[in-house]
Amino acid sequence: MEEHSSTIKNLYFKAFRAVDDRAACMKFIEGHTHVLEIYGITQITSAKIDWVLNPDVYVVQVMAEKDGKALAGGRIHVANGVNPLPIETAVGTMDEKIYELVSSNTAKGIGEFCGLWNSWEIAGMGIGSIHLGRTFIALAHYLKLDKLLGLCAPATYRNSLRVGFRVLRELGVNGKFYYPAEDLTATGLIIEDIENLPHAADEERDIIKKLRDKKLSELMITTTKGQEVTLHFDLFDI
């Protein structure tokens, strides 16, 4: 039976390494593909599924019950000098400077937050727009990354800046690319100091630091419809 937002009381955020849980990866792919199909988007590099074999990919899945159906999610790809990051494949032909940015920071630790999606069942809860952003920055810190890249759609632009990204104005047209189609735009983003998050809003920085320091394992939120939902975080057992 499908969950609807009015019946959901709990959401579980579970992190795992892609190569360690093939079944969970398949749930992620099924949910992400369905959302992209609804919007008619097919040519998007982060939707390719070869990442399931990459030992440097980490996934966060959101479920209404433990090990249940995937309702939202995203990934961090850690640059390893072998597998290109999705942003390299997406915009490299438009601006080759992305390759140097990644290669020059690979040894220090650079990754990409990508593959973000949110199902209609939990629309209006802010899961895809803000809560997963916080979660992935906390996870990036745990993975000892120095920098985190992103390529965001207009819908997530404002909240991406709130959680600490800045626009990569050095790339594309002042940071913008016509992607994944000529009539759509995406903005290149970067966090250059994951430890201190100087560009994050104060409230967001505080929550992210509590998440990464394991001082926040549950968070009660109120949806736009006035419903209370408890978020449960299980991020560091990977």
Image (tube, helix red, strand yellow):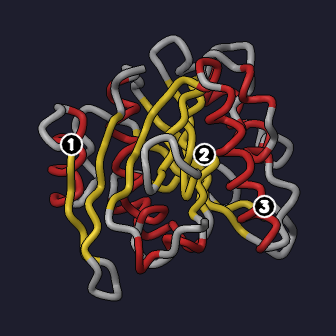
Q: Nearer the viewer, residue 3 or 47?
A: 3
Amino acid, disc 1: Ser
Question: Which mark is nearer the camera, 2 or 3?
Answer: 2
Amino acid, disc 3: Tyr
Question: Which mark is nearer the camera, 1 or 2?
Answer: 1
Query: Disc 1 or 2, which lies upstream in sequence?
Result: 2
Q: Is residue 136 left or right of residue 149?
A: left
Amino acid, disc 2: Cys
Q: Is residue 139 left or right of residue 84?
A: left
Q: CA gap, disc 1 to disc 3?
A: 36 Å
Question: Which mark is nearer the camera, 1 or 3?
Answer: 1
* Residue shown at the point (77%, 72%) measured from the top left: 184
**Other-residue count near label 3 (Cα within 10 Å), few / some / many at <14 / 14–19 / ≥20:** some
Q: Which labelled disc corresponds to residue 114?
A: 2
For residue 40, which quarter of the picture?
bottom right
**Residue at which label 3 appears:** 179
Residue 57: percent from left, percent from top: 60, 26
Q: Is residue 57 left or right of residue 162?
A: right
Q: Nearer the viewer, residue 61 or 47?
A: 61
Q: Nearer the viewer, residue 167 or 128?
A: 128
* Residue shown at the point (49%, 62%) measured from the top left: 128
Q: Is residue 169 visible?
A: no
* Residue shown at the point (68%, 26%) measured from the top left: 22
Query: Disc 2 or 3, which lies upstream in sequence?
Result: 2
Residue 200: percent from left, percent from top: 27, 54
Tell me the element at label 1.
loop
Tell me the element at label 2.
strand
Q: CA gap, disc 2 to disc 3?
A: 14 Å
As drawn, 130 above or below 226: above
**Residue at which label 1 appears:** 217
| Contact check, label 1 and label 2, Cβ < 8 Å | no
**In the rendered view of the protein, which quadrant contains the C terminus?**
top left
